Image: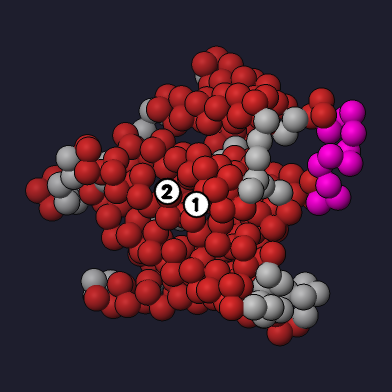
Amino acid sequence: MPSSARPDHLPRHLAVGMLLFIGCTFATNHIAARIAFDDGTGLLLALMCRSGLSLLTLVGLVLWQRGSLRLPAGLGRWQLVLGLLIALQSLCLYSAVARIPVALALLIGNLFPIMLALLTWALGGQPPTRRASLLMGIILIGLVLVLDLPAWIASDQDMGPDWVPGILFGFGGASFFAVGVWITEHRLSTLAGPVRSLYTILIVFSSMVAAGVAGVLPGGMDTPASGTGWLALAALSILYTTAFSLLFISIPRLDMARNAPVMNIEPVASLIMGWLLLNQFFNGRQLIGGAIVLGCIVALAYSKKR
């Protein structure tokens, strides 16, 4: 594409402001999800509503842009794998959000760059640089602090019965997302972004419907017990769709290679809102660990040569 045909980047202060808004909207979506789950909403129902509304919006956007939905030969199976991976990532992330503090679930989910770097290396790519290896080591130290492992070892009663499953679901979500990003970069890089996004959301929605009909997850299609749960279910769907659509429309002008680390505002925003709305507290050691992990993730993102 000639440079004259490319959309101009927004001024950096506007791009950063928009990314901050998108990140905070994604965080609010997860807070709403936790409220919905606490009111008895089924996991599959929440994901089906979220992906269904996103799918309708995305179809409208693609039709408005008059984009082609044709999949090039040979890419169909990789698109299917990507959609299934994102469906699993969504299940794992919401499962973590339902069990442990929202900020902790998102912080663990944001560890996917480490897993992506190791996966790329294992599959024949270049190994991480010394700087990246050092940052990843510091992230692991920070993770020990944010998970409060010393207190966990001393007394698991303080953490609750859902602590271990929640952490494992968080790591599962990060792992599935890392594999999905690798497939996107190495197998689907020639596929237009709108087409890839549309088919990915379609597969996620179809997977949730199929799992709900088959009764794969007990209670997965349970409806909220009160009006609060219904409002939270509607809010999580609208918030996710708003953030996703805004990112989808604006991404060509946001200079993501330079500004993507701003999106790490999401766990910070969820920490603040979790404290204000859900009474989810962290001790000083966990806050220091979270700051270490988040800072090193941002440093890793800025160190990538794109």
The local crowd at label 1, few if under 14, some if 14 to 19, many if 20 or more residues have their Cα within 10 Å, is: many
Report x, y in % for residue 58.
37, 71
User: Mark 2: which amino acid?
Assistant: Gly
Residue sitting at x 58%, y 45%: 275
Residue 76 sits above or below residue 1 on the image? below
Numbered badge on residue 23: 2
Name of the residue lying farthest toward the left: 4
Range of magenta residues? 152-162
Label 2 close to label 1 by CB (< 8 Å): yes
Residue sitting at x 55%, y 15%: 130
User: Mark 1: which amino acid?
Assistant: Ala
- Would you identify the image quadrant in which residue 61 lies? bottom left
Relative to 153, 139 lies left or right? left
Circle 1: element type: helix
**Quadrant the C terminus occupies:** top left
- Would you identify the image quadrant in which residue 213 lies? bottom right
Decide whether residue 160 is among the magenta residues.
yes
Residue sitting at x 65%, y 26%: 284
Relative to 190, 160 lies left or right? right
Residue 4 sits above or below residue 119 on the image? below
Numbered badge on residue 27: 1
